[in-house]
Image: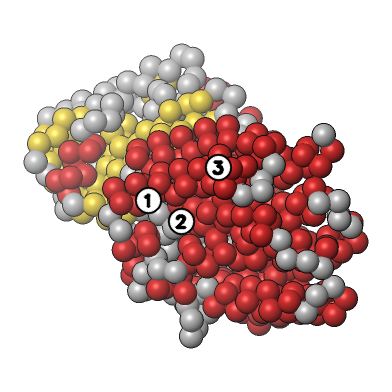
Amino acid sequence: MLPADVETLLDAALVAELTVVTPAGSPVTYPLIPLYDGRTISMTSAVLFSRKLEHLRANPKVSVALSDPVGVPAEPFARATVQGLARVLDEEDPHTAWERLLPLWRAKEPAIDKLVKQRFGLPLFFERVVIEITPVRSLFWPAGDTAAPPQVVELARSR
Amino acid sequence: MVRLAVEEAVRRGASYPHAVLSWVDTDGFPVSVAGPFRSAGEEVRVGPLSGSVRPAAGQEVCLTFSHIRPQPGVGYDQRRYVNLWGPATEDGDEVAIRAVRASGWDEAETPFVEYAERNVGTGLAFLAERGRRPRLPAFWRFFLATRLPFLTATIVPVALGGAVAAHDGRFAWGWWLLALVSAVAAHLGINIANDLADAEGSDAVNVTPTPFSGGSRVLQYELMSRQRLLALALAMFGVSAAIGLWLAAARSWWLLALGAAGLVLGAGYSVPPLRLVHRGLGEPVVALGFGPLMTAGTYLAVTRDWSWPAVYASLPVGILIALVLYVNQVPDRRADEAVGKRTLIVRWSRERVIGAYAASVAVAFALIALGPVLDDQPAWTLIALPAIALARPVLTGLRESYDAPYGLLKAMAANIGLHFATGLLLTAGWLLAAVL
């Protein structure tokens, strides 16, 4: 389980930076909404933007950074990075499977309900794949001060 | 992500309040650290950062600048971000990155719908590799394929023809409804034929579709096959022709000529060999088909007689529906030009397009204003004149958003409203003249 301070950031975050590793070993960062259920961090990707999914299938190691005081409106402000192992749930039906995350999504982006009702206008955007991230380590910077060493919490022995 | 020139990306990055530095740590996990930064040329320095979390000397890092604006009760907007990649070097409490490549996205420059449209191929390939296709319920596929909301273009002239017949004391619900169903089916068939004709042409290269332009996209999104779409078009034309033949036999054989002209113009609008819209003739064809042909045809079906007042009444409606097509072609013009679809919008300058729009609206409303003088139009039809106010937001939109397809949405909607409101008010004018 993640430290409470990190969970607070995850619950507040409208955007997080998901970093994946390409087959060439390069990090690539994507801003996405993190959806945290108390156990795993879920993100969804439209099939339109599926390159990250290909990278994740080849290498499941990821980091999720909570860095932006505007996009992560938590009080008091802090920063965190969660490292974890991602599962790309692409065996699920991309038309409907992601809808189970709507309660968490709606809490952060209420307009999603209106968009879902109009999904006929952008059908491929609503063919979505769930990325489920199991945290293995967290780094936490109180007050967002990254000039200081982070508080590191190991969440799993096997990495 | 869109590839960016490195210096441009660094310049853009400078406008963000902080940067996120990401690299792959020794056990293979990415790690990200945010911090303040300063930049010059192709170099960005992030820090001060703790010495305990740093990339190795010379290690490739990804530097991200990201922004959203929260919108309470809605979500957020103003999405934009920039990614830079390059080797990192330590310098005191800073990490210096000499960027060698960059990418990013700014929805103010590339609207989300366009960004998504540019990635449709990626999405379809991803689904195909897993044996899947995009799905929508049958109703919504029919709604999209036939472009159902555009039926106002047919409902208005048919209603007007019925109103003129009612004014003359000769309205008959049964014949009017048959005329309406035949016209609706023809219109839906024409819309599908237009999609089939443009599938390999302008719709294929159009990356800025809107709800009003760029085709239905059912083929581009693989929601329906060509064969199924063709079958649907033929079914629509079949229904229209069958009812049209019945009406011709029962009411007037002149309906056969009108119906044939309508189908030839409708299909020939976009289908070879005529492809009238490619020749800059789309507007007059639409004005004729969705103006006099439908209004006078409806009157003929209902009363068995020709009516010149019905033809006159339909002229403003025909002009205004042609202007709907005209304005909706503005966001499509680059795609149209790329495939040799030489619409008036492609041929003319921005100033000429806007000027011709204003002049055409003026002609349409002058015809309404002068109707009781020049022709036997009831004075009650003058109640349609205030609808001209709806042209103002269209002109404003054209002037301000000519090069911004999604900025034109309100103008395109107002333009459709201009046709619909004017047509309904004209219809009401004829009906009021009949009962008062």
Q: Would you say A131 lies left or right of B52 here? A: right
**Residue shown at 51%/74% (left/top)?**
B270
Please state the chain letter of the residue tagged with numbered disc 3 in the rendered image.
Answer: B
Element marked by disc 2: helix
The image's mark for residue B370 is 3
Q: Nearer the viewer, residue A154 or A127?
A: A127
**Residue shown at 12%/41% (left/top)?**
B43
CA neighbours of label 1 inside 10 A, class few (<14), some (14 to 19), many (20+): some
Q: Looking at the image, is mark 3 or mark 1 earlier in the sequence?
A: 1
Residue picked out by circle 2: B326
Q: Disc 2 residue type?
A: Tyr
Question: Spatial distance from mark 1 to mark 2, Cα to Cα?
Answer: 10 Å
Q: Position of residue A99 (x, y in %)?
A: 69, 47
The image's mark for residue B230 is none
Q: Disc 1 residue type?
A: Ala
CB atoms at circles 3 and 2 under 8 Å apart?
A: no
**Residue shown at 40%/36% (left/top)?**
B396
Please state the chain letter of the residue tagged with numbered disc 1 in the rendered image.
Answer: B
CA neighbours of label 2 inside 10 A, class few (<14), some (14 to 19), many (20+): many
Q: Looking at the image, is mark 1 or mark 2 earlier in the sequence?
A: 2
Q: Quadrant of residue B45?
A: top left
Q: Position of residue B129 (x, y in %)?
A: 56, 74
Judged by depth in the image, the label closer to the viewer, 3 or 2, is: 3
Q: Nearer the viewer, residue B39 or B219?
A: B219
Element marked by disc 3: helix
CB atoms at circles 1 and 2 under 8 Å apart?
A: yes
Residue picked out by circle 1: B356
Q: Quadrant of the C terminus of chain B?
A: top right
